[in-house]
Amino acid sequence: MKKLIVFVSLFAVRLVLAQTGTIKGVVLDKQSENPLEGATIELLNTEIATGVITDFDGRFILKDVSVGRQAIRVSFIGYESTTIPNVVVTSGKDVSLTVSLLESFNQLDEIVLTTETTKDRPLNKAATVSARQFGIEEVTRFSGGRSDVGRLAANFAGVSTPDDSRNDIVVRGNSPTGLLWRLEGIPIPNPNHFAAFGTTGGPVSAVNPNLLKNSDFITSAFPAEYGNALGGVFDLGFRTGNPDDYEFTAQAGLFTGIEATAEGPMGENKGSFLLAARYSFASLVGAGAGGASTAVPDYFDLSFNLDFGKGKLGNFSVFGILATSNIEFLGDEIEETDLFASEDENLFVDSQIGVLGVKHRINIGDNAYLKTILGGSAAQNQINADRFIDQDTPQERSLDYFETDNLEGRLTFSTLFNTKVNSRVTLRTGVVAENFIIETLLRDREEQADVDGDGDPDLVTLRDVDESFLVLQPYLQGRFRLTEKLTLNTGLHSLYNSLNEEFVFEPRAGLKYNISNAQSISLGYGLHHQSVPLPLLFLNENVNGEAVQTNRDLDFVRSAHYVLGYDVKLAPSWRAKVEVYYQDIDNAAVEPFPSSYSSLTEGSDFVFDTDRVSLVNDGTGFNRGVEFTLEKFFSKGYYGLLTGSFFESRYEGSDGIERNTPFNNGYVINFLTGREFKIGAGQNVLFVDTRLATSGGQYFTPVDLEASQNAGFEVLQEDLAFSERFDNYFRWDVKFGIRLNSKTKKQSHQFYLDFQNVTDNENVFVRRYNRLTNQVDQVNQIGFFPDFGYKFQF
């Protein structure tokens, strides 16, 4: 009997102890980014005090932590302590954290200041305004997000998405082409499946959120280390794998695909590997691309981060993304309302993305480090269209109608030196050098004459380029804590392009004043330049019978950003923020004769105009607006986010008439909230999330129906450019799920159902001339659409 009692007692204890997890991580000096040995980590809100001390490398491990949401406090003598709430602990996977502590202003050891780490503050300490960080929890939590970082950003103030079929984002009225993607400190090509040449978005992201560490999204007045961008910056980073234990994840989702992730220790220097692969779920089950399409998207991506640990020569790591995608739209399977293709065409789309980088970091003394990255990347897309002439007649024949093959390669070298001069001054200097290799071919019969007299429009070569050029970006920036309440971030960025041989200087500055522990005001300024999109630069123009690239020497487009912000902590876990901004744009590419065209309007579609040649840098524009954010960080079982943007985006072409850009929605409002309910013994969770999104309708240029009918292709009324507007956009998404933690093993399960556009609202996708119906037809975006996902971690 005693043995039985002992056995039952031990088994009960095992059940209790088994529903635990592990929190591990590293503690760094926020300025030098070097590890802090001897920092204290305390687990809060527990009956028994639990704490550990960081080792020589700043690492710590908290074991046997109860599953659920936990909070820890990190402290170190002479530094401001920080509290990290909402650390989600599961039984299936260890939690890894990177904690940065700021040295006290006056270095008074006896004074302890405590701050709370929240996602509204960016990781980049030089970003004063218009920036916030995000992590895997936000990417995967919000309803309707499809585990896509681009769609996540659409919930932030100042951001909108033009349509549901792609994840292009419009930041403060700028074209999506103004966005910069960075991974591990280097610029990368468009990281999306089915990406088109010169664009920054796509239907499906190739960035696997399970590899992301906390990263930054910046919408204006960027710090000096970012360049060749006008609209925004995604500064992404990959986390390292678990250096102590092997862990695995199996996952399935309608949009994310079938996925497997593996991580664990590697080598003898606390190194690790992290590897994840995904394959299209739709391809496995034969589901269509959405809307009226029966075409099946096929895509695969592989992402990895290999960390070789800290050795005598510093820390080396290798990271990368490999992705492929293809889809076929066959005319005899196409419906008239299809979003992407026509009934009398076969359309074939292929794309590939590759990013490979080697990163090295070495500490120089206690307060400085040197980080160097050597990377290579390539993005290729191929599109071919065959059109059936005299379809469904005895004379039916197939004609090569459209062909494009675009390759954008980059060899990238990036190095930066960061030093903490003292507790008040941090300096950073570096350079990014990119050697671009462009091979692009574009041949099209659309809108072409029958010069050779064979009865068909001629197949004209609009681009045929094999070119390389250098983009160089040196920079210097400093962070100065002028007083305990006043901080200045300032720097200088430079940009050089060997294609147009232009070299520009870009001053950047940000000033933040803490009115109190709960309130602050901030000012930001930045001068930014960006090259005209490559598909425009390399267009051919027929000059005296020869194909000449008359756009290749265009200057950079220039934009000056001005931002004023106010931030207030209304209560514990509640925060509000308001920002007012103005962006003054000039040097946009316009036509040399009076016209409504401007390069500022490109990027609202899958393709670029192909007849805009001999352009000049005489266009102007502006974006101005006010944004607010009201955020309830997760506490007491729920969270909430309300963002609103009210803005105006206008431009002038060479005709001098001020017009709306296609991105001038006028307003964008998002409301998100979610609730978690503990079930069972309190270790498992039911959750529900919802999202309401609405915005003003997108401006568009009306079709000249009579001219289109006479020409046989779409002709727009360009004198009325962007004068008409779609109906306002509205969408409501609802997500339900459950998270289960194993009682006996290191395992956890998560399942969700995500009902997107539950009201089946008919949001307009496009109004276009349909040469088959000879009318202007309206195509709507995706209606009600259910998504699902399952994740198993062990």
Image: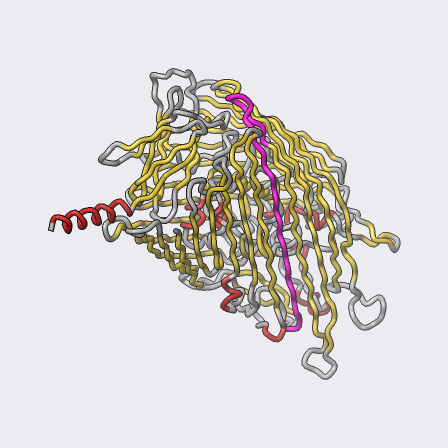
x, y percentage for residue 374?
64, 38
Image height check: is 83 above or below 667?
above
Tell me which residue sits at (25%, 36%) in the image: 46
Q: Is residue 451 left or right of residue 751?
A: right
Indicate whether residue 611 is drawn in magenta.
no
| Residue name at image x 66 percent, y 39 percent | 412
Q: Is residue 319 above or below residue 463?
A: above
**Residue 478 visible, this angle:** no
Q: Is residue 359 inside the magenta stretch?
A: yes
Q: State the residue in front, 404 or 697.
A: 404
* Residue 703 against residue 90 in the figure, above or below: below
**Quick check: 3 above or below 185?**
below
Which residue reaches farthest right? 544
Which of 87 and 149 lies nearest the eye of the viewer?
87
Q: Position of residue 616 (x, y in %)?
A: 75, 43
Give how far across and how far down residue 388 sits, in percent: 70, 74
* Residue drawn where x is 62% and y is 75% of the image: 332
Q: Which residue corresponds to the image point at 50% horizontal and 58% vertical from the top-left? A: 727
User: Which segment did they paint magenta?
Assistant: 343-371
- The spot of residue 750 in percent (x, y) is 37, 54
How many marks are shown on the rendered structure? 0
